[in-house]
């Protein structure tokens, strides 16, 4: 299995989990042309698209994806904010704690906390990739997940950086509070990783890094030092082996 990053961050999020036979899209917060190009204009292997919430940087192409004939899986709230006026039969409403199967991907959705209608995270299990956690755009995760093999997790900002920029005497505390309420900090990310058993984890991929409130090198270094796992910051065009067994 490979993880491909079409785009990450507030500019747009879209990722692909693919092997030779099947491709699962994670988010579609980019122009549809970018998705088409990343799939080499071959949509026959795409089994579905998971969307966490309605914000443009995650759901921009949701209707175009359905028009391509691809099934989209998202919460009722997400579809209500982004869906077509006429309900498409490609719309698959899911709820937190629901288990469902798309091709050989077994998926469980879980609720997260974000300034969106009914935002979700996903635990994705495939015989090749093993258990993949996809967690973004939340300020907290109340769940832990046993037996993870690969992790895709938001590390949006560091508390240290925003405290410095938007501290008590900056006059911009509202900005600091909005970021704190809606996104996962490096510190949240490290706590989440600490709370889970990482014995069988091969990759930790940091996503949705803020342009101005993060430090890629420092984030990768800190997460590596805590976990001693392979840690990669997602960038546009990145491709990684994403398997259950490390070799
Ligand atoms: Zn969002
Ligand atoms: Zn976002």
Image: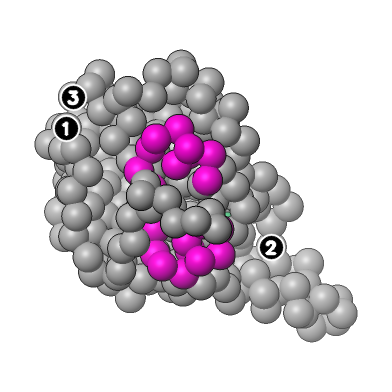
Circle 1 is placed at which residue position? 128
Q: Position of residue 156 (x, y in %)?
A: 57, 57
Q: How crowded is mark 3: few (under 14 residues within 10 Å), some or many (20 or more)?
A: few
In magenta segment, residue 98? no
In this rendering, would 82 be left or right of 22? Answer: right
Q: Earlier in the sequence, mark 2 or mark 1?
A: 1
Q: Earlier in the sequence, mark 2 or mark 3?
A: 2
Image quarter of residue 127: top left
Q: Residues within 10 Å of mark 2 (few under 14, many from 20)?
A: some
* Quadrant placement of the C terminus: top left
Q: Residue 110 carries which label?
A: none
* Quadrant placement of the N terminus: top left
Q: For this rendering, which residue is in front, 140 or 40?
A: 40
Q: Position of residue 103 (x, y in %)?
A: 19, 38
Q: Which of marks 1 and 3 is nearer the N terminus?
A: 1
Magenta range is 63-83
Q: Do the residues labelled 2 and 1 touch (CB within 8 Å)?
A: no
For the residues labelled 2 and 1, the Cα–Cα distance comes to 38 Å
Circle 2 is placed at which residue position? 161
Looking at the image, is 243 positioned above or below residue 140?
above
In this rendering, would 50 be left or right of 222? Answer: left
Closer to viewer: mark 2 or mark 1: 1
The residue sitting at the front extreme is 86
Closer to viewer: mark 1 or mark 3: 1
For the residues labelled 1 and 3, the Cα–Cα distance comes to 12 Å
For the residues labelled 2 and 3, the Cα–Cα distance comes to 37 Å
Q: Residue 247 carries which label?
A: 3
Identify which residue is drawn at 33% across, 75% down: 142
Q: Is mark 1 on a helix, strand or loop?
A: loop
Q: Are marks 1 and 3 in contact (CB under 8 Å)?
A: no
In magenta segment, residue 64? yes
């Amino acid at each position: 299995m490979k993880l491909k990053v079409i785009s990450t961050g507030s500019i747009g999020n879209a990722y692909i989990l693919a092997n030779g036979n099947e491709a699962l899209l994670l988010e579609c917060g980019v122009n549809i042309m970018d998705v088409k190009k990343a799939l080499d204009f071959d949509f026959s292997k795409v089994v579905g698209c998971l969307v966490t919430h309605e914000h443009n940087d995650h759901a921009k192409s949701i209707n175009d994806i359905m028009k391509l004939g691809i099934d989209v899986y998202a919460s009722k709230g997400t579809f209500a904010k982004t869906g077509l006026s006429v309900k498409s039969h490609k719309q698959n409403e899911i709820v937190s704690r629901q288990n469902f199967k798309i091709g050989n991907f077994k998926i469980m959705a879980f609720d997260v906390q974000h300034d969106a209608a009914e935002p979700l995270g996903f635990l994705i299990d495939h015989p090749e990739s093993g258990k993949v956690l996809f967690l973004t755009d939340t300020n907290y995760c109340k769940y832990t997940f046993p037996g993870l093999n690969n992790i895709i997790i938001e590390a949006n900002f560091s508390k240290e950086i925003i405290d410095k920029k938007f501290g008590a005497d900056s006059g911009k505390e509202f900005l600091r509070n909005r970021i704190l309420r809606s996104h996962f900090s490096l510190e949240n990310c490290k706590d989440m990783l600490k709370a889970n058993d990482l014995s069988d984890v091969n990759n930790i991929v940091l996503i949705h890094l803020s342009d101005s409130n993060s430090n890629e090198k420092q984030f990768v270094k800190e997460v590596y030092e805590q976990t001693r796992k392979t840690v990669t910051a997602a960038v546009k065009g990145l491709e990684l082996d994403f398997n259950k067994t490390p070799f």
